[in-house]
Amino acid sequence: MHLTAVFQKVPEGYIGFVEELPGANTQGATLDEARANLTEAVELILEANRTMTVPCLGIVRARRTA
């Protein structure tokens, strides 16, 4: 999977976000801090998405009718 990280210099430091992953955004005093924060945010979002998806996969079953 390839994602695009975008970083922008702002007066307070740096902001960063991933265009393809809603909710993946962060800030940091330095570019390195913003990168580390964004990496963590992406990992947490992907893990949360996997956690929400896995139970749904077990629910999709055909029911027999008598």
Image (cartoon, helix red, strand yellow):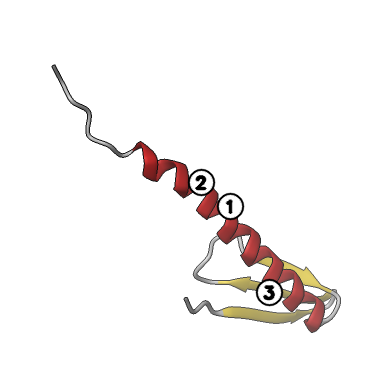
The local crowd at label 2, few if under 14, some if 14 to 19, many if 20 or more residues have their Cα within 10 Å, is: few
Q: Label 1 amino acid?
A: Ala
Q: CA distance from mark 2 to mark 1?
A: 6 Å
The structure residue drawn at horizontal position 75% and vertical position 70%, both measured from the top left corner, is: 37
Q: Which residue is mark 3?
A: 16
Residue 27: image quadrant is bottom right
The local crowd at label 1, few if under 14, some if 14 to 19, many if 20 or more residues have their Cα within 10 Å, is: few
Kind of element beneath mark 1: helix
- Image coordinates of residue 5 in percent, x first then y, are 60, 78
Q: Which residue is mark 1?
A: 48
- The reply, left or right, for residue 28 in relation to residue 55 is right
2 vs 3, front mark: 2
- Determine contact: label 2, label 3, CB under 8 Å: no
The local crowd at label 3, few if under 14, some if 14 to 19, many if 20 or more residues have their Cα within 10 Å, is: many
Q: Which residue is mark 2?
A: 52
- Quarter placement of the C terminus: top left
- Determine contact: label 2, label 1, CB under 8 Å: yes
52 up-or-down from 32: above or below:
above
- Image coordinates of residue 35 in percent, x first then y, are 73, 78
- The reply, left or right, for residue 21 in relation to residue 63 is right
The structure residue drawn at horizontal position 46% and vertical position 48%, both measured from the top left corner, is: 54
